[in-house]
């Protein structure tokens, strides 16, 4: 447990020193909120976007970089399993995304007078499921793409269209019908739906079940394809 805590703390420190991650997970959503004039209806989608940025935008390059630099291979010869490092990366990305989302929600309520979420515990659960789901997809990308630059690029290419088509960056109602139908099949869509439902206090069992299924499937695929070197 001490090793895992130390690894997680280290991953959080490294993440806090990454200006790109800080911008896209903290400053960028706040900029969008200002453009939306504090519209509370946009906040759940922006929170899903923050989770996607951490899990799909940042994590694949980090994991691929560890493998490329033989960090995972060296850890395999020590009492600290490389699996612990990967788990610490999930916790770090989820914690950073949660912090960015909390800051976003506080800014929306305090600065713009947005209505607060109706069901905070359900919102937290929905967010964590969304964040871990994004991390599971990030591991799949890192398993398929072996080098750091390629993993980061593919992660971004998968993430950016998804946050628009899934309704995270813009409401899906404003999209053409053909794009909405594509969004129906994207893994981030149930995350946005679950967060929207929790924000308004509505039960969101089905989207959460879908998120849990994606987490299981993504983890299984990543475990089957992932190589330590």
Image: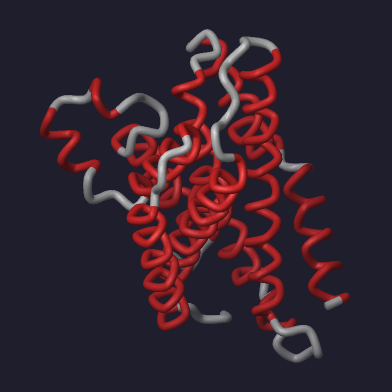
Q: Is residue 198 above or below residue 154?
A: above
Q: Residue shown at 63%/27% (left/top)?
A: 105
**Where, by quadrant of the figure, is residue 184 drawn?**
top left
Q: Is residue 78 above or below residue 134?
A: below
Q: Position of residue 150 (x, y in %)?
A: 46, 55
Q: Position of residue 58 (x, y in %)?
A: 57, 49
**Where, by quadrant of the figure, is residue 71 drawn?**
bottom right
142 vs 181, nearest the viewer:
181
Q: Position of residue 81 (x, y in %)?
A: 72, 84
Quarter that holds the C terminus: bottom right
198 vs 85, nearest the viewer:
198
Quarter that holds the N terminus: bottom right
Instruction: Give the residue at the far left of this rendering.
Output: 178
Q: How many marks?
A: 0
127 vs 218, nearest the viewer:
127
Q: Residue shown at 69%/46% (left/top)?
A: 96
Q: Position of residue 55 (x, y in %)?
A: 53, 53
Q: Residue shown at 53%/43% (left/top)?
A: 53
Q: Residue shown at 51%/50% (left/top)?
A: 126
173 vs 121, nearest the viewer:
121
Left or right: residue 31 versus residue 209 is right
């Amino acid at each position: 447990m001490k090793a895992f805590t130390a690894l997680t703390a280290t991953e959080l420190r490294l993440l806090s020193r990454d200006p790109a991650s800080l911008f896209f997970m903290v400053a960028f959503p706040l900029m969008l909120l200002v453009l939306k004039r504090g519209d509370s209806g946009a906040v759940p989608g922006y929170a899903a976007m923050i989770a996607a940025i951490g899990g799909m935008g940042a994590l694949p390059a980090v994991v691929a970089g560890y493998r490329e630099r033989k960090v995972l291979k060296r850890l395999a010869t020590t009492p600290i399993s490389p699996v612990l490092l990967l788990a610490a990366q999930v916790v770090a990305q989820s914690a950073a995304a949660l912090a960015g989302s909390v800051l976003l929600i506080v800014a929306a309520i305090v600065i713009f007078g947005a209505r607060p979420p109706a069901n905070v515990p359900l919102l937290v659960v929905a967010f964590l499921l969304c964040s871990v789901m994004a991390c599971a997809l990030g591991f799949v990308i890192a398993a398929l793409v072996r080098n750091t630059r390629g993993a980061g690029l593919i992660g971004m290419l998968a993430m950016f269209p998804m946050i628009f088509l899934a309704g995270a960056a813009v409401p899906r109602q404003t999209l053409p019908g053909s794009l909405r139908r594509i969004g129906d099949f994207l893994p981030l869509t149930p995350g946005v739906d679950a967060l929207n439902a929790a924000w308004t206090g509505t039960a969101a069992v089905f989207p959460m079940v879908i998120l849990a299924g994606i987490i299981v499937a993504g983890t299984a695929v990543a475990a089957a394809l992932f190589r330590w070197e």
